[in-house]
């Protein structure tokens, strides 16, 4: 299986703000196994933001991000990625896989134990969204993911 990475960013507002989605594309559905995600705030402050990794069934409106193969000899990724969402993806109810309260001065990295990856079905536009919530902060933040397909 080939391995890929993608990074996205977003401005945090008072409602959910998605920095990155990675989903199976509509023409060649495939399963993705996410084995690493990370979050960081680009505007350090003494605030805490709720960072989440959740399942999605539709990608919303975003700026396209080209997933990068970790081995330059691998094919292009079949998954599609998006950043800087102007329209939020459709999240599956009660689907929070990872929830991390994170101080804006810190970074967070999650790495799956072998066999503990987040796996998505081979269904068009189904994947994961990395988003954040804060009641009053407006700052820039970034999120990234690594997966295999």
Image (spheres, rainbow, N blue to C red):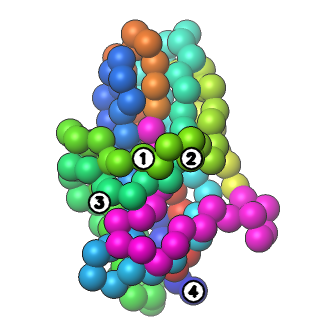
The span picked out in magenta is 112-131
Above or below residue 35? Residue 8 is above
How far is disc 3 from disc 1 in space, using C-alphas? 20 Å
Residue at left 43%, top 54%?
56
How far is disc 4 from disc 1 in space, using C-alphas? 27 Å
Q: Residue 1 carries which label?
A: 4
How far is disc 4 from disc 3 in space, using C-alphas? 21 Å
Residue at left 52%, top 73%?
121
Name the magenta segment's main secondary structure. Answer: loop
Q: Residues within 10 Å of mark 3 (few under 14, many from 20)?
A: some
CB of mark 2 within 8 Å of CB of mark 1? yes
Instruction: Provide the secondary structure element on which disc 1 rests.
Output: strand
Residue 53 in sight here: no
Which of pointers 3 and 2 lies earlier in the amino acid sequence? 3
Q: Does the magenta stretch include residue 138?
A: no
Residue 32 in sight here: yes
Q: Name the residue under label 1.
A: 91
Q: Where is residue 106 in the image (x, y as percent from the top left)?
A: 60, 27
Which of pointers 2 and 4 lies earlier in the amino acid sequence? 4
Q: Position of residue 115 (x, y in %)?
A: 77, 70
Instruction: Provide the secondary structure element on which disc 3 rests.
Output: strand
Q: Does the magenta stretch include residue 122?
A: yes
CB of mark 3 within 8 Å of CB of mark 2? no
Q: Which of 82 and 95 is in front in this view?
A: 95
How far is disc 2 from disc 4 in space, using C-alphas? 26 Å
Occupied quadrant, residue 77: bottom left
Q: Which of 2 and 99 is in front in this view?
A: 99
Q: Mark 3 points at which residue?
A: 65
Which of pointers 4 and 1 lies earlier in the amino acid sequence? 4
Locate the N terminus by quadrant. bottom right
């Amino acid at each position: 299986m080939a391995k890929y990475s993608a990074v996205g960013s977003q401005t945090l507002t008072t409602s959910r703000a998605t920095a990155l989605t990675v989903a199976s594309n509509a023409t060649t559905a495939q399963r993705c196994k996410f084995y690493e995600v990370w979050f960081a705030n680009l505007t350090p402050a003494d605030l805490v933001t709720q960072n989440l990794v959740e399942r999605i069934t539709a990608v919303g409106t975003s700026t396209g991000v080209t997933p990068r193969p970790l081995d330059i000899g691998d094919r292009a990724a079949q998954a599609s990625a998006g950043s800087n969402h102007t329209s939020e993806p459709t999240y599956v109810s009660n689907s929070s896989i990872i929830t991390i309260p994170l101080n804006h001065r810190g970074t967070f990295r999650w790495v799956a134990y072998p066999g503990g990856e987040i796996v998505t079905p081979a269904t068009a536009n189904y994947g994961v969204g990395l988003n954040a919530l804060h009641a009053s902060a407006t700052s820039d933040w970034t999120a990234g993911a690594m997966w295999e397909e």
